[in-house]
Image (cartoon, grey):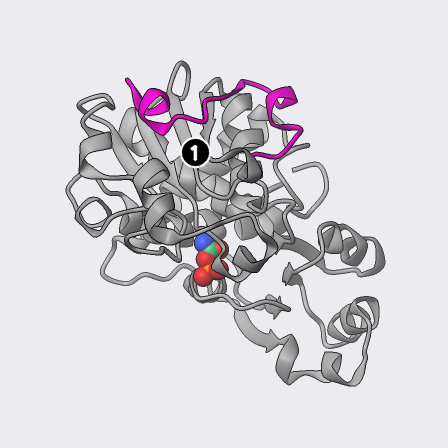
Amino acid sequence: MKKKELLGLQHATKEEIVRILSTAEDMYGILKQNVKRTPYLAGKNVVNLFYENSTRTRTSFEGAAKALGASVTNISASASSVKKGESLIDTGLTLDSLFADIIVLRHPMGGAPVLLSQNVRASVINGGDGFNEHPTQGLLDMLTMKREFGDFRGLKVVISGDITHSRVARSNIWGLSKMGADIVLSAPYSFIPPEAERMPNVTVEPNLDAAVVGANVVMGLRIQLERASGGLFSDGEEYNTYWGITEERMKLADKDAIVMHPGPINRGIEINSDIADCEQSRITNQVSYGVAVRMAVMYLITRGDE
Ligand code: CP
């Protein structure tokens, strides 16, 4: 990594992505051992600074940091001095003074990790910023595909759901396109961002039945029910009829296709339970690979030059 941080995949090089995924494979080997620990980050302080709720990302970064021997502090903005009006930069400077080596930031505003990175000494990792990027989710999704198919070239990846508001979709598009995969976005037009067809290796096919034909990966995204009042979404049952990932639809995909979802999932809306829990589903594997990817990113940020 040129700079000791991970703010997104848009500006990451193919070589950097390859290196992270290959290091993550090694880290996954450590996690499969009886003793899931290695001292690569012993003596380092990792701070999870979360301005939004999270189950997977926060816990995964914590598990990854502990597996590498680091000390971890979790800060939830709602229970911190942010509630008293402290700015992101002042919070970052405070964490610098408390000897943070890595700050993992989740924030509702796109670009917040860049702002923090410009103002602190610690390395910053983007744990999801607004609608912009969620790079470690993109990388763990790519690791899931790599472990399944070996190569990304020519892989047909269908992404379905609320793509407009999805930082996961954007990180996947930036990362997968660099690796040579073909990405098909399928959703109602209100969920397709206007810039979609200008993004690399991306086509738009609003009809999910047509989109899924021959797909190797079908990735559902959460329908953000909290935005339903904005008129982007009418009703879960209707959505499921046209855009739900169902057993019938998966029959149109390649016979070895896998189903993915970053979570949290809305069962019966963007994905049906029989598919979320079926043999083709890699949803729980994604979570496990996430720990390995976050170990790899923190290792490369702190010790990558060695
Ligand atoms: N996939 C994901 O980012 O989940 P969390 O919001 O639970 O971290």
Q: Position of residue 176 (x, y in %)?
A: 49, 27
User: What element does badge 1 sit on?
Assistant: strand
**Would you place residue 96 above or below residue 178 in this image?**
below
Horizontal side, residue 22 vs residue 51: left or right: left
Indicate the amino acid at tag 1: Ile
In the rendered image, is residue 64 in sight?
no
Give yes or no for residue 201 being in the magenta stretch.
yes
User: Residue 139: within the magenta?
Assistant: no
Q: Residue at (19%, 50%) from the top-left corner? A: 277
Q: Where the N terminus falls, by quadrant? A: top right
Would you identify the image quadrant in which residue 74 lies? bottom right
Question: Foreground: 194 or 22?
Answer: 194
User: Would you say the beta carbon of the disc 1 residue lies within 8 angstroms of ligand 1?
Assistant: no
Q: Residues within 10 Å of mark 1 (few under 14, many from 20)?
A: many
Position of the C terminus by quadrant: top right
Q: How many marks?
A: 1
* Magenta region: 192-214
Q: Is residue 201 visible?
A: yes
- Looking at the picture, tell me which residue is in the foreground, 294 or 279: 279
Q: Nearer the viewer, residue 58 or 207?
A: 207
Residue at the extreme top? 154
Q: Residue at x 22, y 23 (%)?
A: 252
Residue sitting at x 56%, y 59%: 229
Q: Position of residue 107 (x, y in %)?
A: 66, 61
Q: Percent from the top left, x then y, of residue 75? A: 61, 76
Residue 62 in the figure: left or right of residue 304? left
Q: Which residue is mark 1?
A: 159
Above or below 272: residue 81:
below
Picture coordinates of residue 86 (x, y %)? Answer: 81, 78
